[in-house]
Amino acid sequence: MDLLKSIAVATSGLRSQSGRMRVIAENMANADSGPERAGADPYRRKIPTFQRRFDRELDAQVVDMGRVQRDQSAFRVKYDPGNPTADAAGNVRMPNVNSLIETMDMREAQRSYEANLNLVSSTRRMIQRTIDILRA
């Protein structure tokens, strides 16, 4: 594979993982936020998706951030009778975000990002060494 092509493919992975980390960070920021008003739904967890496409210019498969979907799992219920958004039983519906899962997803996204970054760095070093050899 052409060295510049490998950098372009890794760059598409960097962009996708960066978008994934943004979505995860939004989920984590809203993990404990309650509904805005009584009877309203709280924040619903977002799930990043990816899609691959064939880039004709590169003649290679690349990855793009797909649509961000909403997690349709049930909301958490928290007993808080003093909350103005609580129902008659004193329960408040909370976001369906599990901080542990989001932390693990973030770590996985970071590792994927680092792997793509290492590929770009290694390829740049190979290109530089090739130029150095040609100059000698």
Image (cartoon, helix red, strand yellow):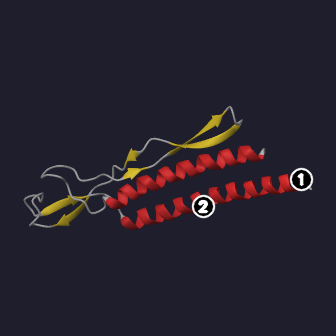
Q: Secondary structure at mark 2?
A: helix
The kind of residue on which mark 2 rests is Glu
Seen as rendered, the residue at the extreme right is 136
Q: Identify the residue position indicated by label 1 in the image.
A: 135
For marks 1 and 2 on the same chain, the one whose residue lies earlier in the sequence:
2
Location of residue 106 in the rendering, given as x and y in whole percent from the top left corner: 47, 62
Q: Quadrant of the C terminus?
A: bottom right
Q: CA distance from mark 1 to mark 2?
A: 31 Å
Front one among 82 and 12: 12
Q: Secondary structure at mark 1?
A: helix
> Where 40 falls versus 60 (above or below)?
below
Q: Identify the residue position indicated by label 2 in the image.
A: 114
Location of residue 71 in the rendering, given as x and y in whole percent from the top left corner: 36, 50
Q: Is 120 displayed left or right of 78 in the figure?
A: right
The kind of residue on which mark 1 rests is Arg
Q: Quadrant of the N terminus?
A: top right
Front one among 127 and 102: 127
